[in-house]
């Protein structure tokens, strides 16, 4: 029995708001009625795409939200997407399409991280846009991403507020100047890249697998395919208390197991497969040997059965019958069903057929969750929904067993075992970058290591502040000089004025010209004395530094650096080390350290120690656009590369 602690998860949520562009003042009740009709139209229009979707935690939903403060009444939805980030981007696609189908609507969307659309396009944002001034600036309108700009100077543009706009101000700007607030093509492309391929991409995110399951779970999943997510989550987040209910199964008996085809999302399938779990001996779930051809189906079914048993164990044996009311008694259901038929939701299926009834059941479930949402106090938990289906939907085990012979084939799960190259390619595609072409052996032999030192110099010359350093966006980008005045101004704002400055006695050049001659003379004399004192201090400091260099030269610290004097091949330099050590103590002339050579050798040493894995050296070089060839050499041969750099530098000198 596995007695592990419950896994900690972050309840990642995404919120979406849909506003009706203001055209005239409306009566609050009339406005509420209009928005509710929009909700019905939206949910019905997108039902063919939303109904079969398997959500990780919560589905896409909309409800009326009354106005509060500066925020007018609007349509609002919130979805917990948990570990499946694709749910969030699918919602972005849906929200974008809503504004395209209904041009009079404006939408904004954010999650736990805030304006995550801006985070996705961070490499292309204008310099003025930062988290402090991005509130109420990012919207979808007519299927396009819009960013309300900020004026360079207060009042420079009459229709732009100098501070982050309120929601009414933003809606007014979008309705009056829609062409002036469109996001740049690069920002649009960064967001569109994440939602490219929908709605066809939905099928690519699914995985069909065979599972050896109790017949009751098979019957439940035929009626509610989305409940597979709740079952997987219950198993994935189990704790020792949950597992007590699985010592002896009461709801899903192991002797009723049959083979069935279950549709997961790839995220759910990975969560179920990747966890090792041994069932309790008392549970009755015995596993075949791993060599068994259907071992994976038995393992998946055993884990999923534990999840469903945990869900049902959390229900009271006599949960309120008021929760079992049929949602199709709502007066909205008839109109909703008629709209589904007009939108060809049933795909021409004969009414009353098994496939028609399956899609009808999914539509009822969708209507209950997203259109006619009950209050949270009356909503059925997944366990209660499972028990309700078992009580109200009879099933025949023999009929289900007959279906075993005609199960559809399983999907290939090789995507779980990506090679490092395939993983790198996926990461490159996710980042919107082209895959780097591999370096040939000939190019590797002629690889110029001076590119490493030059790139590092370019990086150091970039602008840096207390907020961090800027990495070059392109390797060919010209280096930006360090702005010392701006850097000091940052610290002045944080730490206050420097000691020699005064808030009230600052004098500029004109003030100095107005001084009396005696004061002017005193000032010049004082300046000459300060200059002489400064020169003396610098000379003393140089003397101290030279003495420190001399003392460190013969220590292990000094010997760890390579000097410019060592231009010979490594075999010759190593044979002369003893002579240098003997002469170093006698006060010989100090040779300057070869900064470039030490930099490259240390980076290569760090890169080699990563053994092909990600690390500080490879990450830093990749961010600067430098791609080192694969290190297929052994560590003893790395000095050969360094000696090659010595020769190159020697010829340059």
Image: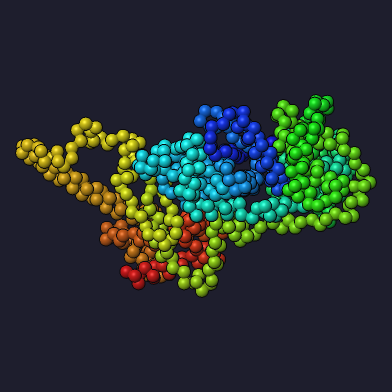
Q: Is residue 205 above or below residue 566?
A: above
Name the quadrant containing residue 647: bottom left
**Identity of the residue drawn at 65% across and 43% down:** 83
Above or below 266: residue 490: above
* Residue 101 location (% of width, % of height): 62, 47
Percent position (x, y) of residue 17? 58, 38
Q: Is residue 241 left or right of residue 119?
A: right
Farthest front residue in view: 24
The percent coordinates of residue 311 (x first, y second) are: 77, 35
Q: Is residue 392 left or right of residue 620?
A: right
In the rendered image, which quarter contains the C terminus?
bottom left
Specify the color scheme. rainbow
Instruction: Check the image and name the residue furthest to the left.
Output: 517
**Residue visible at 62% across and 28% down?**
29
| Mark count | 0
Q: Relative to residue 32, is residue 624 drawn left or right?
A: left
The answer to whether residue 244 of the structure is visible from this angle is no
Q: Residue at x 54, y 71 (%)?
A: 440
User: Which image quarter holds the N terminus?
Assistant: top right
- Quadrant in the rendering for residue 245: top right
- Camera-side residue of 564 and 625: 625
User: In the displayed image of the protein, which residue is found farthest to the right?
Assistant: 398
Location of residue 232 (image quadrant):
top right
Along the line of sight, which residue is nearer the eye, 283 or 585?
A: 283
Q: Is residue 290 left or right of residue 97?
A: right
- The outermost residue toward the bottom is 442
Q: Can residue 623 be seen from the camera position used here?
A: yes
Residue 549 in picture, x, y percent from top left: 30, 53
Front position in the image: 223 or 260: 223
Image point (53%, 37%), residue name: 22
């Amino acid at each position: 029995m596995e007695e592990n602690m419950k896994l900690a998860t972050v309840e990642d949520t995404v919120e979406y708001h849909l506003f009706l562009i203001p055209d005239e003042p409306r009566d609050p009740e009339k406005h509420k009625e209009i928005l509710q009709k929009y909700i019905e139209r939206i949910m019905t229009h997108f039902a063919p795409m939303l109904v079969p979707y398997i959500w990780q935690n919560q589905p896409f939903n909309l409800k009326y939200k009354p106005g509060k403060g500066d925020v007018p009444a609007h349509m609002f939805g919130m979805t917990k997407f948990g570990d499946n980030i694709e749910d969030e981007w699918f919602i972005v696609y849906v929200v974008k399409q809503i504004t395209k189908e209904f041009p009079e609507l404006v939408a904004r969307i954010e999650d736990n991280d805030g304006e995550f659309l801006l985070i996705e396009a961070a490499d292309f944002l204008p310099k003025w846009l930062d988290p402090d001034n991005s509130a109420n600036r990012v919207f979808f309108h007519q299927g396009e991403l819009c960013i309300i700009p900020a004026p360079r100077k207060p009042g420079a543009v009459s229709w732009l507020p100098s501070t982050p706009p309120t929601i009414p101000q933003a809606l007014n700007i979008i309705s009056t100047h829609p062409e002036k607030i469109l996001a740049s093509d690069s920002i649009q492309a960064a967001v569109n890249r994440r939602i490219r391929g929908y709605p066809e991409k939905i099928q690519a995110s699914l995985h069909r697998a065979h599972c050896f399951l109790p017949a009751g779970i098979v019957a439940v999943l035929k009626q509610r395919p989305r409940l597979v997510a709740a079952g997987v989550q219950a198993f994935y987040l189990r704790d020792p208390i949950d597992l007590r209910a699985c010592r002896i199964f009461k709801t899903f008996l192991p002797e009723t197991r049959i083979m069935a085809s279950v549709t997961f999302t790839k995220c759910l399938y990975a969560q179920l497969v990747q966890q090792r779990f041994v069932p309790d001996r008392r549970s009755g779930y015995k596993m075949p040997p791993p060599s068994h051809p259907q071992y994976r189906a038995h393992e998946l079914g055993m884990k999923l059965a534990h999840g469903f048993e945990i869900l049902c164990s959390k229900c009271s044996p006599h949960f309120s019958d008021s929760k079992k009311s049929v949602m199709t008694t709502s007066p909205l259901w008839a109109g909703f069903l008629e709209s589904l038929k007009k939108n060809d939701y049933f795909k021409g299926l004969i009414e009353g057929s098994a496939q028609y009834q399956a899609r009808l059941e999914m539509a009822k479930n969708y209507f209950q969750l997203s259109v006619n949402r009950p209050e949270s106090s009356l909503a059925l938990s997944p366990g209660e929904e499972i028990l309700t289906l078992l009580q109200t939907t009879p099933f025949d085990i023999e009929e289900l067993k007959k279906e075993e012979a005609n199960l559809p084939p399983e999907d290939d799960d090789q995507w779980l075992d990506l090679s490092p190259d395939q993983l790198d390619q996926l990461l490159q595609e996710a980042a919107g970058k082209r895959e780097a072409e591999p370096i040939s052996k000939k190019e590797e032999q002629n690889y110029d290591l001076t590119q490493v030192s030059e790139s590092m110099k370019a990086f150091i010359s970039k602008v840096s502040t207390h907020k961090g350093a800027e990495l070059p966006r392109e390797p060919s980008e010209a280096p930006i000089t360090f702005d010392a005045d701006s850097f000091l101004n940052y610290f002045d704002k944080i730490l206050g004025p420097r000691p020699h400055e005064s808030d009230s006695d600052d004098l500029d050049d004109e003030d100095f010209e107005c001084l009396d001659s005696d004061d002017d003379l005193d000032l010049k004399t004082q300046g000459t004395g300060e200059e002489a004192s400064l020169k003396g201090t610098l000379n003393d400091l140089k003397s101290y530094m030279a003495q420190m260099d001399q003392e460190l030269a013969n220590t292990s610290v000094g010997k760890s650096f390579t000097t410019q004097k060592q231009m010979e091949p490594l075999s010759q330099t190593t044979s002369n080390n003893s002579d240098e050590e003997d002469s170093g103590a006698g006060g010989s002339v100090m040779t300057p350290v070869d900064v470039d050579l030490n930099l490259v050798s240390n980076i290569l040493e760090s890169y080699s120690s990563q053994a092909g894995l990600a690390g500080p050296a490879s990450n830093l070089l990749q961010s600067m656009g430098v791609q080192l060839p694969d290190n297929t050499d052994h560590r003893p041969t790395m000095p050969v590369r360094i000696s090659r750099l010595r020769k190159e530098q020697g010829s340059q000198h």
